[in-house]
Amino acid sequence: RRTRPAPETATAAPADGDDGDGEGDRFRDAFAVMARFPWFGVGMALWFVVSLGIGLTAVAGPVIAVESLGGTGAWSVLATCLAIGSLLGSLSVISASKQHPWRAAAIVVTLGAVLQFTALILRDQLPTLVIGASFALCALATAACGIVWDTAYQSEIPERYLSRVGSVDNFVNAVGVPLGMLAGGLLTRHYDAVFLTVCVLLVLLGLPAARLAGRERKTSP
C-alpha cells in the first residue's frame, strides 16, 4: 500500500479553447460558438426538425399504412424504401470524389423531407408505391446530406471548437427523434396538421441554412 505521495507526473495541457470543462460546460459553451457561426446554428435547427420528422415517421408510418394504405404489408413496403434510400444515400457520398457543399445539401435535405410529408398528406390520392418512392428519396437525401453536414462543420469550424459543437450536434439528433415519436403517438388524430407544420418549419429553416452556408470558413481569429 502506498504510504507517501506518488511522484508528480506531467499531464497534457488542455487544448486551446478547451480548459478541461466537462460535457455540460462544453454543451453550454457551444451556444456562444454558434453565435460566431450563424450558419451552424441555423443548420442545427434544420437538422432538429429533420430528426423530429424521422421520429414522427417511425410512429405515424405504420398507423397510416394500416388505416389508409391497406395494412401492415404497405408499411413493409415503406420501411423497405426507407432502408434502400438510406443505404444508397450513404454510398453515394462515400463513393463520390467531388466535394458536396452544404449550401446545396441544405436545399436537398429540405426538399426530400417536404416531399415525403406531402406524400403522406396526399396518401388517399396516391398509390403506395409513389409514397414509397418519396420515402426512399427522403431517406437518401437525409443520409447523404447528413454526411455532407458532418464534413462541412468539421472542416469550416476551428478545431478547438469542435468538441463543443459536436455536443450540440449529438444532442439535437438524440432529442429530435424521440420527440418526433412522442408527437406521432400523441397526435394520431391530427397527422395532416402535424405534417404540414413540419413542412413549413423545414422550408423556413432550409432557405436561410442554404443562404448562410459557406459564409464563414475556418480561420484563426
Image (cartoon, grey):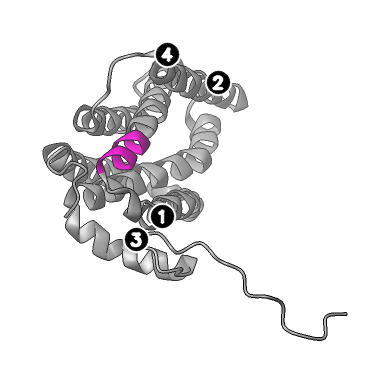
Q: Using the numbered discs, state the Cα–Cα distance from disc 2 to disc 3 in whole angstroms.
A: 46 Å
Q: Earlier in the sequence, mark 1 or mark 3?
A: 3
The local crowd at label 2, few if under 14, some if 14 to 19, many if 20 or more residues have their Cα within 10 Å, is some
Q: Report the residue marked by disc 1.
A: 163
Q: Report the residue marked by disc 4.
A: 95
Q: Using the numbered discs, state the Cα–Cα distance from disc 1 to disc 4 in whole angstroms.
A: 27 Å
Above/below status of 22 relative to 187: below
Question: Which residue is rendered at x = 15% and y = 44% of the image?
Answer: 216
Q: Secondary structure at mark 2?
A: helix
Find the magenta span and give its range: 149-156
Q: Report the residue marked by disc 3.
A: 16
Question: Which quadrant does the C terminus fall into?
Answer: bottom left
Residue 17 picture location, percent across and down: 33, 62
Question: Which residue is rendered at x = 46% and y = 55% of the image?
Answer: 175
Q: Which mark is residue 57?
A: none
Left or right, 148 with respect to 209, comes to right
- Of 71 and 142, which appears nearest the observer? 142
Instruction: Give amino acid for label 3.
Output: Asp
Q: Residue furthest right?
A: 1
Q: Using the numbered discs, state the Cα–Cα distance from disc 2 to disc 4 in whole angstroms.
A: 22 Å
Q: Nearer the viewer, mark 3 or mark 4?
A: 3
Q: Using the numbered discs, state the Cα–Cα distance from disc 3 to disc 4 in whole angstroms.
A: 35 Å
Q: Earlier in the sequence, mark 2 or mark 1?
A: 2
Regarding residue 28, the answer to whether it shows in the image is yes
Q: How many marks?
A: 4
Q: Earlier in the sequence, mark 2 or mark 4?
A: 2
Q: Report the residue marked by disc 2.
A: 80
Q: Earlier in the sequence, mark 3 or mark 4?
A: 3
Q: Secondary structure at mark 1?
A: helix
Instruction: Give amino acid for label 2.
Output: Thr
